[in-house]
Image (cartoon, rainbow, N blue to C red):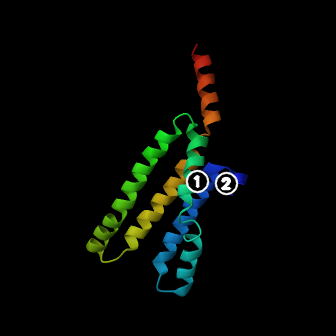
């Protein structure tokens, strides 16, 4: 998919599929919902780790790729650490994980939109050069 669509588009699709899988968990008492979760989320579970270098390189270039991936890994680790705590707090307050699942699905959709909204590095560089030329 990344070869055909590009890293950013594939990353957005992966986040959207993850959101669908998370929302499917809202109906976890039904077998169909569990199967939908396994298909939607299970197929894309570890894909962000593989696509993030490609998406970062497409969006920000490769000059400081290692540093950018380090920053991304730091925030990913924070998310993985905070996610269960946040979900637990929401459960403690409401007695249900539904709000947490909706929150996490919404965050995934926002991530998909953000990665699609980021301009490819070449387009951003061209836009900056045109802006500098116009300003001069």
Distance from disc 1 to disc 2, alpha carbons, whole Å, reads: 8 Å
Residue occupying the far right of the picture: 4
Quarter of the image where the N terminus is located: bottom right
Packing grade of label 1 (10 A; few <14, some 14-19, many >=20) is some
**Where's residue 47, x and y in %?**
57, 60
Which of the numbered marks, if any, corresponds to residue 2? 2
Please report the residue visible at 51 percent of the width from the left and 58 percent of the height from the top. 109
Please report the residue visible at 43 percent of the width from the left and 54 percent of the height from the top. 76
Please report the residue visible at 39 percent of the width from the left and 57 percent of the height from the top. 79
**Where's residue 74, x and y in %?**
40, 49
Residue occupying the far top of the picture: 136
Quarter of the image where the C terminus is located: top right
Q: How many marks?
A: 2
Helix, strand or loop status at disc 1: helix
Q: Are marks 1 and 2 in contact (CB under 8 Å)?
A: yes
Q: Is residue 65 above or below residue 34?
A: above
Which of the numbered marks, if any, corresponds to residue 51? 1
Packing grade of label 2 (10 A; few <14, some 14-19, many >=20) is some
Q: Is residue 25 above or below residue 108?
A: below
């Amino acid at each position: 998919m990344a070869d055909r669509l590009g890293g950013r588009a594939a990353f957005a699709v992966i986040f959207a599929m993850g959101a669908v899988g998370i929302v499917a968990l809202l109906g976890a008492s039904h077998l169909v919902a569990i199967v939908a979760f396994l298909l939607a989320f299970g197929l894309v579970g570890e894909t962000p780790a593989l696509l993030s270098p490609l998406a970062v390189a497409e969006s920000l270039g490769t000059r400081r790729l290692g540093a950018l991936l380090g920053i991304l890994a730091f925030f990913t680790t924070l998310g993985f650490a905070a996610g269960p705590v946040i979900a637990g707090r929401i459960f403690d307050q409401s007695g249900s994980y539904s709000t947490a699942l909706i929150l996490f699905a919404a965050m995934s959709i926002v991530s998909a939109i953000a990665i699609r909204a980021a301009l490819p590095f070449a387009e951003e560089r061209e836009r900056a050069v045109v802006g500098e030329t116009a300003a001069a």
